[in-house]
Amino acid sequence: MDEFTSRLVKLHHCKSASWKIIYQLLKIDPMLNSISPNYSSVYTPIDFPLNHSKFKTIKEELRSNKIDEQVQQYKYDHIRIISIFDDEYPPLLKEIYEPPWILYTKGDLTLLKNATILAVVGSRESTAYSHQVIQHLFPQLIEKDVVIASGLAKGVDTLAHEGAIKYGGRTIAVIGGGFYHIYPESNKKLACSIMNQHLLISEYPPNTKPARWHFPMRNRIISGISRGTLIIQAKRRRGSLITANFAVQEGREVFAVPGSVLSPHSDGANELIQQGAKLIRNAEDIIEELVY
């Protein structure tokens, strides 16, 4: 890790350093020299783009050895760090609104270079219909080397990861907390399998406990690394629809599996189809849009 990346990673660990604060710092100080412990800042509160007291708080956080110790531990835990300025950073993800400055990864990074990543999301209260849809769609998708991305949540997310593995494909899980706090706990075994044989991603430092607001933000990464998003069963105004909205904003394909008009589990997916999402009957409906 070069000096600039090291400074960016340390800054990313500071609780006071939001995405916008990091952006402001990079605009005025592209090499982040001002956060070096041996650097005497020449900036005054007038020309510095931050509230001066907030910058002082960040400097105080950086003076602690705690961040250095945490970062040094990552290599022993086989955690790879990718910054937005690195070649390994997924090009599609750079196109989204407020792309993560840093990705923490475990597993096969070559999956991020795959040109055919499909996000698969849906209800956390999956039914037998979700199982049947995955059994129907996944074998042919995987035969075409489509990589399945999802969020490791209960329900459809879990079925998507497990289905990709079951049918001999590859999967990427984007989590809403750090690697040392896998959520939900019921998916720890699945997460271990993914980080060992597939790919696990987080935009949060590994010791970050998941918070409620992390999960909608995580959804922008799931859709951001993918060329299309498939919704399998979703209630109205749920997280999977947030993922679909991110995909629309990013100019990506949105697919939805129709469901019974009598089931609230399909209300969201059916509504997306009304709004213009492509109705999916078989794997070929997706392949013709994603696989060239």
Image (cartoon, rainbow, N blue to C red):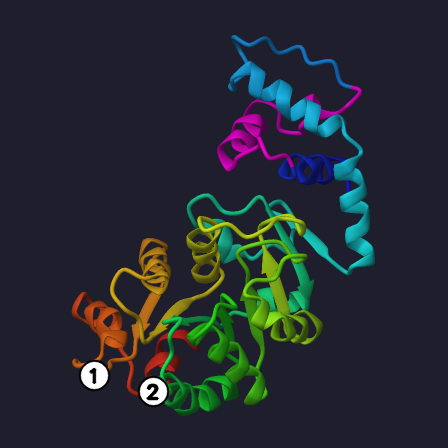
Magenta stretch bounds: 14-38
Q: Image quarter for residue 199?
A: bottom right
Secondary structure under badge 1? loop
How many circles with numbers are drawn on the protein?
A: 2
Position of the C terminus, as image quadrant, is bottom left
Alpha carbon separation for disc pair 2 and 1:
10 Å
Going 65% across and 39% down the picture, which residue do you hit?
Answer: 13
Residue 208 in the image: state x and y as whole percent. Answer: 62, 48
Q: Amino acid at mark 2?
A: Tyr
Q: Nearer the viewer, residue 135 or 284?
A: 135
Question: Quick check: is 27 in the magenta stretch?
Answer: yes
Question: Quick check: is 67 in the magenta stretch?
Answer: no
Q: Amino acid at mark 1?
A: Ser
- Residue 260's disc number: 1
Q: Is residue 200 above or below residue 33?
A: below
Q: Nearer the viewer, residue 52 or 36?
A: 52
Q: Image quarter for residue 182?
A: bottom right
Residue indicated by mark 2 = 129
Q: Nearer the viewer, residue 129 or 184?
A: 184
Is there a contact, CB below 8 Å, between mark 2 and mark 1? yes
| Mark 2 or mark 1: whose residue is earlier in sequence | 2
Going 63% across and 39% down the picture, which residue do you hit?
Answer: 12
Residue 206 is left or right of residue 280, and the answer is: right
Going 59% across and 88% down the picture, which residue do you hit?
Answer: 168
Furthest residue in direction front, as rendered: 185
